Amino acid sequence: MGVELLSPAPGKILKIHVNRGDLVTEDTAVIRLEAMKMENEIFAPAGGTVTEIRVREGDEVETDDVMAVIN
């Protein structure tokens, strides 16, 4: 199942810092999201391997959209 990395707010994906298969630790910056004219780093809620990245740079996301999955 894994841990889903959810968008905290509507916004635009500016940068994806990881690739599928990367090993991350808790609090690793995974995605940079522009929301309400501010850039926000979205951090891994848990350590593990990035098994899915469901967004691309430039994509628009809504609150609670799944952006990545960490197992």
Image (spheres, helix red, strand yellow):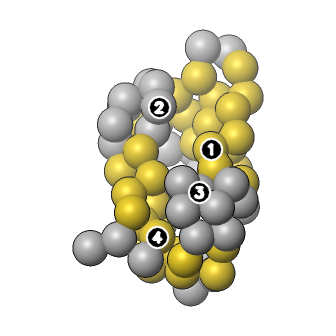
- The kind of secondary structure element at disc 1 is strand
- The kind of secondary structure element at disc 4 is strand
Q: Quadrant of residue 65?
A: top left
The answer to whether residue 16 shows anywhere in this view is: no
> Viewed as shown, does residue 14 lie left or right of 58?
right
Give residue 12's position: percent from left, percent from top. Answer: 55, 34
Q: Is residue 39 above or below residue 13?
A: above
Q: Which residue is mark 3?
A: 44
Q: Is residue 34 above or below residue 20?
A: above
> Viewed as shown, does residue 26 lie left or right of 39?
left
Q: Quadrant of residue 20?
A: bottom right
Q: Earlier in the sequence, mark 1 or mark 4?
A: 1
Q: Residues within 10 Å of mark 3 (few under 14, many from 20)?
A: many
- The kind of secondary structure element at disc 2 is loop
Q: Which residue is mark 1?
A: 42
Look at label 1 and name its amino acid.
Answer: Ile
Q: Residues within 10 Å of mark 2 (few under 14, many from 20)?
A: some
Quadrant of the rendering where the C terminus is positioned: bottom left
CA gap, disc 4 and disc 3:
8 Å
Q: Quadrant of residue 54?
A: bottom left
Q: Which mark is residue 70?
A: 4
Tell me what residue is drawn at x 56 percent, y 85 percent: 21
Q: Earlier in the sequence, mark 2 or mark 3?
A: 2
Judged from this view, the residue extending furthest toward the top is 36
CA gap, disc 1 and disc 2:
9 Å
